[in-house]
Image (tube, rainbow, N blue to C red):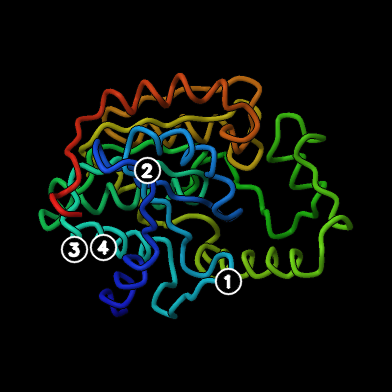
Amino acid sequence: MTESEVARVAAATLNRVGTDVGRPILVLHGGGGPFTVAPIVARYLSSHPVFAPTLPGWNGTARPETADSVPALARGYLDALLADGLQDVLVIGSSMGGWMALEMAALAGADEHYANVIAGVAVIDATGITVAGETIADVFSLDARGLAEVAWFEPDRGYRDPSAFTPGQLAAQRANQDTMRAIAGDPYMHDPTLASRLQFIAVPTAVLWGEGDGVVTPAYGRALAAAVPGAVFALLSRAGHLPQIERPEELWPVLDGFVQTVRGTALPAGY
């Protein structure tokens, strides 16, 4: 793997929005694409520099063959942040983006090369590990109705009738799914080594979970939080896999409180 190639792609997608002052925040989306974390980006862009990348391969963006796994992307984005002189970045990740955030924090905690790059991590209904007795729903095998049933506390709100989409929209959805399959399909939605490496995470970590998530259950979330030293776990009522979309009023008080407690450093001069 050519790490520099992945880092170059990561750097090109960082997409900074928001203010020029305050602690930098990196927001990472999951398989559904950037729109799934748009509410998080909007929440903080008036008070923080926010980096909101479209991950390589999503929404028609280029993905080099070396960007072939979540760990590869995690290291690529760490390298991109380091190359830009960014420090004390708070990483917020949803679903697969939460897995990537955990990978970044574990890598940074185990390698002094990345010292001070990551200040904290908040993951929302993340994947990434295996938990005894818990399964990650096979989203590749589900139709639109089935996906709404597992991903939403109120499935009727989440269901989108495929017949209402244009051919172009359907093609884009299939392409995004193909990218997710290439990056996280085998092994499915986890890294077999991550659970043992979570012990290296040395920054404040919040694990936030929708109580009705059927993609990865709250029991999975609690096990994930227990594997990260000092992590806090919060259950969000009447929310499924994407609380920032289905129940933001439950997410914001918890996430805002965490963001305010994490130490931070402003952007480098002239960034």
- Which x, y percent locates residue 153? 71, 29
Secondary structure under badge 4? helix
- Residue to which mark 2 is pinned: 18
Q: Amino acid at mark 3?
A: Ala
Image marks 2 and 3: residues in contact by CB distance under 8 Å: no
Left or right: 156, with 257 as reference point: right
- Sequence-wise, the earlier of marks 1 and 4 is 1
- Badge 3: few (under 14), some or many (20 or more) residues near its Cα, within 10 Å? few
Task: Give me the residue at 58% from left, 71% from top.
Answer: 60
- Residue to which mark 3 is pinned: 83
Real-space CA distance between mark 4 and mark 3, rounded to the nearest whole angstrom: 5 Å
- Sequence-wise, the earlier of marks 1 and 2 is 2
Q: Amino acid at mark 1?
A: Gly
Secondary structure under badge 2? strand
- Sequence-wise, the earlier of marks 2 and 3 is 2
Numbered disc in front, either 2 or 4: 2
Q: Which mark is residue 60?
A: 1
Real-space CA distance between mark 3 and mark 1, rounded to the nearest whole angstrom: 26 Å
Image marks 1 and 2: residues in contact by CB distance under 8 Å: no
